[in-house]
Amino acid sequence: MTLFSEYKKGSLHLKNRVVMAPMTRSRSDADHVPTDIMIKYYAQRANAGLLITEGTSPSINGAGYARIPGIYNEAQVEAWKKVTDAVHEAGGKIFVQLMHSGRVTHPENLSAGGQIVAPSPIRLEDTKMYVDGKGELDIPVPTEMSIDDIAVAIEEYAAASKMAIRAGFDGVELHAANGYLIEQFISPTSNNRTDSYGGSVENRSRFALEVTRVVVAAIGKEHVGIRLSPYGVMNEVGFDKEVDETFNYLAKHLNEIGITYIHLLDHSPMGAPDVPQSIKKSIREKFDGTIILCGGYDKEKAERDLEADLGDAIAFGRPYIANPDLVLRMKHDEELNDPNPDTFYTPGAEGYIDYPILEHHKEKVAMA
């Protein structure tokens, strides 16, 4: 087994074990509709076994950042069709990551009618939100979701998943990491509810599992993955002594639901607490589907973890920003371009679709 070998499990068939990780790039328009430069960006990177899009909101309430895409209206579906067609024409597969930001937003980043919702009215104290033309602003206290609000949000995930399939995606990844809405329910630092969605591990996990079940019912388990980040602390979430119990519980029940993959994100390379190998191994033991590992990988570390059977595929983030031909460069041990952080989230083509592709790779990389 190597990073560049074919992978088959159940209905998941990948030409290699390289995954492009979901990365916010903020290239959609102000109404969260994907723009034409996104067609080239994803098509260029279709050499990966699987592309996972940037976080894409399933709800008018969930588009947390400036210029991130959504998939909750027809204009967005039509725009995404151009992306998925280009990726498939280039021989790639693509899942859309459904990311409802919950409390991690500012009203001025939401379309008209959107509101900031969360499991509990707990304000982000140390995190600010960028708004175009205004810079970094304080984030308001979110509105606590009622039981009816929760039911609406769950249905929004199902509706967005159906739209994703109509838009040509091969599946959806539920973003239950990085401190966004699903993890806001899971984490005791962002969820102090006393009803059936708060308190115990089972109750705090309820929203994640209910969302997963309705999405599976809507589009089929073979089209559904989920991203988890045990020990994650991004966007001011955190876990107490029940962290291992929580993620083992989730893995057990996600296995029963039968989704196609769990995408395990380890933030420790970026300074977050170390994630013990024990929890990764435990999740792998409890989950019969595919495991995608992510977090600070290079080719050598990826090969080691695949050889050790810690996962089935490896997701790469920043290396894919600057290297559209990443699979080919890694396979042939060629030098990688360095990404420019100044253009990670800026509008326009610079730092997005203008990174150089090695001349001898151009005939193998989509040049849309």
Image (cartoon, rainbow, N blue to C red):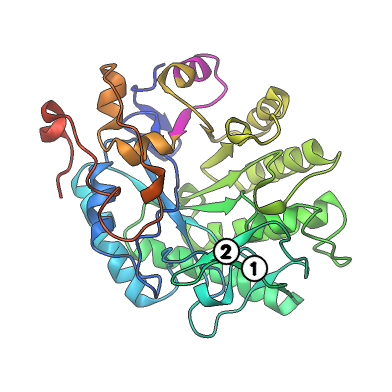
Residue shown at 61% from the left, 36% from the top: 267
* Residue 260 horizontal/vertical position (percent): 51, 42
The one nearer the camera, 56 or 124, is: 124
Magenta-colored span: 303-315
On whether residue 311 falls in the magenta region, the answer is yes
The one nearer the camera, 18 or 361, is: 361
Residue shown at 43% from the left, 63% from the top: 68
**Amino acid carrying mark 2 in the image:** Met
- Image vertical order of residue 326 relative to residue 64, above or below: above
Residue shown at 46% from the left, 30% from the top: 314
- The local secondary structure at tag 1 comes to strand
- Image vertical order of residue 358 relative to residue 165, above or below: above
- The local secondary structure at tag 2 comes to strand
On whether residue 47 falls in the magenta region, the answer is no
Task: Using the rendered image of the protein, determine whether residue 266 is visible from the camera's viewpoint.
Answer: no
Characterize the local packing of mark 2: few (<14), some (14-19) or many (20 or more) Cα atoms within 10 angstroms.
Answer: many
Dots 1 and 2: beta carbons under 8 Å? yes
Task: Using the rendered image of the protein, determine whether residue 357 is visible from the camera's viewpoint.
Answer: yes
* Residue 123 horizontal/vertical position (percent): 74, 66
Lower position in the chain sequence, tag 1 or tag 2: 2
Q: Is residue 22 left or right of residue 208?
A: left
Q: CA distance from mark 1 to mark 2?
A: 6 Å
Q: Which residue is mark 1?
A: 138
- Image vertical order of residue 30 relative to residue 281, above or below: below
Q: Which residue is mark 2?
A: 129
